[in-house]
Image (tube, rainbow, N blue to C red):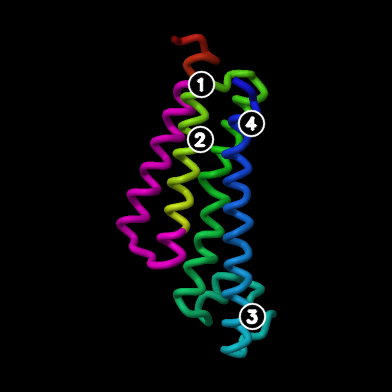
Amino acid sequence: MEAEAILKPVFAMALLTVAVALWMLFTRIPAMQRLKVHPQQGQDTRKLRDYLPHEVNRVSNNYNHLFEQPTLFYAVCISLAMLGHVDSFFVTSAWVYVMLRVSHSLVQGLVDIVIVRFYLFIASWLVLLIMVVRESLVLFQLS
């Protein structure tokens, strides 16, 4: 299987990050203007959260989450492509991971039901864990 197949979900995740960044921009700036929050008050984003409504903060929280767990996803997928170890299992797993992260972003950004977010988070971690363990077994010649 071509390496490009595993890079498509990588770019889908990148597009999700761009979309959430724009969502954050188009919710945070109008809220700051409406509430007359000076941009300098956002120097420490933890303090900025105190000024903004929850529906604005949950989008920026999700944006931050997209730079946590998904960074491992990027590293794993790019490594698989470079090693030439791309197969249908990894490609399917990568797409499942992306769909779980899209779902997580939508839940957090729109309704923020924590238990639903938690299950989506755990499910995405499990997919990523399986990918990491499967490739580690090959790399360390344990399978």
- Does dot 1 land on a helix, a strand or a loop? helix
Q: Position of residue 37 (x, y in %)?
A: 62, 86
Mark 4, residue position: 78
Residue at left offset 64%, top offset 80%? 41
Q: Residues within 10 Å of mark 1 (few under 14, many from 20)?
A: many
Distance between the alpha carbons at the discs numbered 4 and 3: 38 Å
Residue at left offset 33%, top offset 63%? 113
State whether residue 90 is above or below residue 61: above
In the picture, the disc for residue 135 is 1
In the picture, the disc for residue 41 is 3
Q: Nearer the viewer, residue 56 or 18?
A: 18
Q: Position of residue 25 (x, y in %)?
A: 63, 70
Q: Amino acid at mark 3?
A: Gln
Q: Amino acid at mark 4?
A: Ile
Q: Nearer the viewer, residue 123 or 39?
A: 123
Distance between the alpha carbons at the discs numbered 1 and 2: 13 Å
Q: Are marks 1 and 2 in contact (CB under 8 Å)?
A: no
Mark 2, residue position: 94
Q: Amino acid at mark 2?
A: Ala
